[in-house]
Image (cartoon, helix red, strand yellow):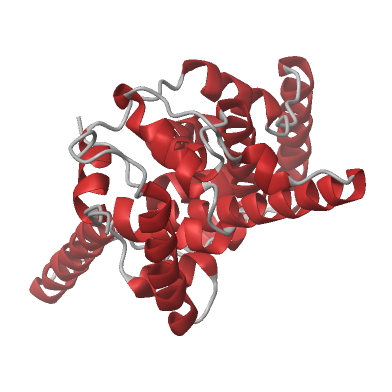
Amino acid sequence: MSKELDLDNLFSQLRDSEPELHESGFLHSVRSALPVKKHRSIGSETVITLAAAVIGCGLAFNYFPAAELLSQLPRKFTITPLFVLSLSGIAVALSALIYLSSESELDL
Amino acid sequence: MVEATDQALIKRVAALACHESFDVLVRRHQAALRYSLRQMTGWDQSLADDLAQETFIKAYNSIGSFEGNAKFSSWLYRIGYNLLVSHFRVARNRELTAGDDLANRTTPTTRFSSNDLHKDLAHALLRLPTQQRMALHLNLHKQLTHQEICNIMEIPLGTVKTAIRRGKKTLQEELSSWKDGDML
């Protein structure tokens, strides 16, 4: 009766001697077969940005109630201990939130 | 320098169709996948590379459907396995139509030198049905658990265990002609 091969040992040998398969040609062939991203030319991107900016400025000039809002601004500020405390509380809460989101990759 | 995780790269590819991020994923996983596919195809390098390329392209096109609860490599193996199965199905149908015997055609009559252990085994594995071949490779070579193999091959746990047991038996018989002390 023939001696049985130790398959675990055989596959362990295979793992140890697994050939290094280089990526160069393969990566190129995969990349060339990927669907091409739609790119706009720099010229058309510039025209779109400028047009959007001009339209935005026009709308803001016509409809934004700047004078009304300015008139509602308080003329003088009184800084009280409670105001300082609230401000520092908000700053601490914001910092904590930013730190937490950067550590846990939380999408805000 | 800290390397980006697979998960972060996948997010970028899904959201921005970022080719550069996908390149990193291909670089990271190509060697293992191509090697496995060579083992599955009787060390047919061009067929294995074609299947690997197709696997990556399919992965790119459907990356939005990738659920992060499995490893990216497992997902790639699942796509690769499905492509492999359909390739052999088409090939078998073609051979049957042509009146040829695929098993006889793909079985090598000669052995490679002892340096070509990988090729020898790949040829021996070709005698096994695709399902057994893949299950055996993932279990013995990749050292994946039965449950992981289940998830990759999308077959029941019992079928995986049976495929591995039968595959081992057939492979033992197939390799019994190897001389004692030649390889092991």
Report the number of discs: 0
Q: Position of residue A61 (x, y in %)?
A: 72, 43
**Is B10 drawn above or below residue B131 in the view shown?**
above
The residue depicted at 24 percent of the width and 46 percent of the height is A10
- Nearer to us in this view, B112 or A40: B112
- Is A82 in front, or is A96? A96
Q: Residue at x 62, y 22 (%)?
A: A29
Q: Residue at x 47, y 35 (%)?
A: B26
Where is residue B92 shown, x and y percent of the image?
77, 51
Q: Looking at this rendering, what residue extends furthest in the front direction?
A: A1
On screen, A19 above or below B40? Answer: above
Is residue B118 visible to us here? yes
Residue B55 picture location, percent across and down: 60, 44
Question: Which picture quadrant has residue A55?
Answer: top right
B62 relative position to A83: left or right: right
Tell which residue pokes out farthest to the left in this image.
Answer: A81
Comparing B88 with A22, the one in front is B88
- Image point (20%, 36%), residue name: A16
Quadrant showing the C terminus of chain B: top left
Give percent across and percent down for residue B124: 46, 44
Closer-to-camera residue (B121/A43): B121
Q: Is residue A11 left or right of residue B83?
A: left
B74 is higher (above) or lower (below) than B153: above
Quadrant (top left, top right, bottom left, bottom right) of the N terminus of chain B: top left
Query: Can residue A107 be seen in the rendering of this structure?
Result: no
Residue B166 position by quadrant: bottom left
Give the quarter of the image for residue B136: bottom left
